[in-house]
């Protein structure tokens, strides 16, 4: 069995729980904390580590989030130096990746990130598709039957129709993530 741990605080809000009162320095895990996790957990088996490097849940106005992927780089280097491991001995997780700059995502990948959470982006993508569908068929969401022509709108307000549009925009966002994370066409399955 593998476990995933979090070190530090991922900012923003998730499931109604926010971190606005958290000291800013807690948004940045120190390499020594990652070293301690490595020393304790590598003895018992595989684990992945979500270290905070300024990442936040949700999306914010550009410039409000200060990602520092070099924290991941420095953490990997400290463990490599102390234990003579190969490059990137930690399997890292990028929590709160939605809305992150593509350059910062790419940099984090170089430092051992193998998983990124993009819940907010996928929620928005799904909602966008549904919203576009509703905007394209406004009468169907006000009337079952057109009051002027008597034409039923059942095919338009059928949830399967607008949910499918949400799925299609969700899939497009996942394709973008696969590209960003350089995982297109790859699988752990053999």
Image (tube, helix red, strand yellow):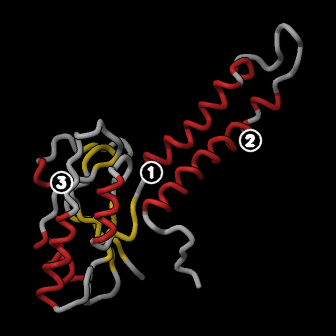
Q: Residue at x 62, y 31 (%)?
A: 132
**If you read the primary sequence from the N terminus, does the residue marked by circle 3 or circle 2 appear first?**
3
Q: Which of marks 3 and 1 is nearer the N terminus?
A: 3
Q: From the viewer's perspective, is residue 77 above or below residue 180?
A: below
* Distance between the alpha carbons at the discs numbered 1 and 2: 22 Å
**Residue 182, image x and y in percent?**
45, 67
x and y, in percent, of residue 55 in the image: 26, 53
Check disc 3: other Cα within 10 Å, few if <14, some if 14-19, many if 20+. Answer: many
Residue count near mark 1 (Cα–Cα under 10 Å), binned few <14, some 14–19, many ≥20:
some
Give SS at disc 2: helix
Q: Position of residue 151 (x, y in %)?
A: 88, 18
Q: Distance between the residues labelled 3 and 2?
A: 41 Å
Q: Residue 51 carries which label?
A: none
Q: Mark 3 points at which residue?
A: 27
Mark 2 surroundings within 10 Å by alpha-carbon count, few (fewer than 14), some (14 through 19), many (20 or more): few
Q: Relative to residue 172, is residue 69 depicted above or below?
A: below
Residue 119's disc is 1
Residue at point 29% right, 57% down? 104
Q: In front: 183, or 139?
A: 183
Check whether the beta carbons of the residues at disc 1 and disc 2 lie within 8 A of each other: no
Q: Mark 2 points at which residue?
A: 160
Instruction: Indicate left or right for 138 with 96 as reference.
Output: right
- In what quadrant of the picture does the N terminus appear? bottom left
Q: Which of 106 and 189 is in front in this view?
A: 106
Q: In which quarter of the image is residue 169?
A: top right
Mark 3 and mark 1 in contact? Answer it, CB < 8 Å. no
**Quarter occupied by residue 136:** top right
Element on which disc 1 rests: helix
The answer to whether mark 3 and mark 2 are in CB contact below 8 A is: no
Upstream in sequence: badge 1 or badge 2:
1
How far is mark 3 from mark 1, CA to CA? 19 Å
């Amino acid at each position: 069995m593998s476990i995933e741990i979090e070190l530090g605080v991922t900012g923003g809000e998730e499931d109604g729980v926010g971190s606005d009162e958290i000291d800013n320095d807690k948004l940045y895990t120190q390499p020594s904390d990652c070293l301690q996790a490595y020393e304790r957990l590598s003895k018992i088996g595989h684990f992945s580590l979500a270290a905070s490097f300024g990442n936040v849940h949700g999306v914010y106005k550009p410039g409000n989030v200060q990602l520092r992927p070099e924290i991941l780089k420095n953490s990997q280097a400290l463990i490599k130096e102390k234990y003579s491991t190969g490059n990137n001995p930690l399997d890292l997780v990028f929590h709160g990746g939605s809305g992150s700059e593509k350059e910062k995502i790419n940099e984090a990948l170089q430092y051992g990130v193998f998983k990124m959470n993009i819940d907010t982006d996928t929620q928005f993508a799904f909602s966008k598709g549904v919203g576009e569908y509703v905007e394209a068929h406004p009468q169907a969401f006000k009337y079952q039957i057109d009051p002027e022509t008597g034409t039923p709108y059942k095919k338009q307000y059928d949830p399967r129709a607008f949910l499918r549009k949400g799925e299609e925009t969700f899939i497009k966002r996942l394709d973008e993530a696969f590209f960003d994370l350089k995982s297109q066409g790859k699988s752990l399955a053999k």
